[in-house]
Image (cartoon, rainbow, N blue to C red):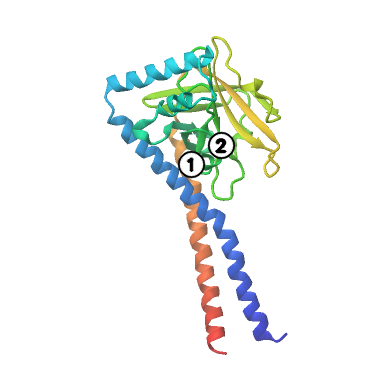
Amino acid sequence: MNKKKRDIIFYFFILIGLSFIAYPTFNYITSTIGNSYVIASYNKGVSKINKEDKKSIIFNAKKYNKELYLHKFNLKSYRWKKIYYHQLNLNNSGIMGYIDINDYGIHLPIYHGSNDAVLQIGAGHLEYSSLPIGGRSTHAVISAHTGLPSARMFDQICELKIGSYFQLRILNKTLDYKVDKISIVNPSQISVIKIEKNKDYCSLLTCTPMGINNKRLVIRGHRVNTRIKNNKSLNILKIIPIYIYVIFLICLLFLGVIAYKKLYLFVASH
């Protein structure tokens, strides 16, 4: 093989390699920006709801949770689904609120349901669990994917430990939870997410191990009254990686343009 052919193959594979490297970086940036926009839109919508309407929404959600705990719903019926999807559904957006885990830069909108279409774009609320508004005899379950090539969802929740904190933000309420139990179970072991009398729980659920996904990682937290302080310097540090990714992507694109031009000029001259 002569030098000219080796050069064209070399530049071709550089372009292919750069494309593979840039793809997850580009998806991470777009998904992060997209989720930030969704959360900002949700907060804007919440700010437009008057105090009485907020009280009514929370009252109905509490009533739903009580009836769920007392097994008053037929969870296979159309009526139940209709009632469920009406709860905490601000402007029919399908969004209940959002989850914050500041220590790991996780900020995801929470959608009704946990089907794959939902989990491709954010976190989902497990339909058969309590609505995430807190209160006695409730156990909300928030689910999200790990290992998606298109976005980072719950990839880092495996780093949570006993005593770690996470927050749910629903309407104008901030619910703080402290991790007290971490379990790895089979998909059929639903006892770990059951509602317990007088307990206020929220569990984070994802598949594990990453890439195999034959088990479920369940991280349970109990409600705490102490408000988690938002460390502004920490939040700023969590924004920095986005800029690093952007700079990295720009560098890749620059190298790609150079490789493309060399390849184009080489082909054009022969």
Horizontal side of 207 relative to 132 (left or right) equals right
Residue at 46% over, 44% down: 239
N-term-proximal mark, 1 vs 2: 2
Identify which amino acid the numbered label 2 is placed on. Answer: Ala
Residue at 51% over, 52% down: 27
Image spot of residue 127 (x, y percent)? 52, 28
* Front position among marks 1 and 2: 2
Image spot of residue 16 (x, y percent)? 60, 67
Answer yes or no: is residue 135 visible: no
Tally of numbered tags? 2
Residue 63 found in image quarter: top left
Residue at 42% over, 42% down: 36
Q: Secondary structure at mark 2?
A: loop
Rate crowding at label 2 as few (under 14), some (14 to 19) or many (20 or more) other CA atoms within 10 Å: many
Residue highlighted by disc 1: 237
**Nearer to me, 224 or 64:** 64
Image spot of residue 73 (x, y percent)? 51, 18
Residue 133 found in image quarter: top left
User: Compared with residue 138, is residue 12 higher up or lower down, i.e. above or below?
Assistant: below
Residue highlighted by disc 2: 144
Image spot of residue 228 (x, y percent)? 47, 24
Q: Secondary structure at mark 1?
A: helix
Horizontal side of 91 relative to 182 (left or right) equals left
Cα distance in 3D space between marks 1 and 2: 24 Å
Query: Can you say which quadrant of the picture contains the N terminus?
Result: bottom right
Residue at 35% over, 39% down: 41
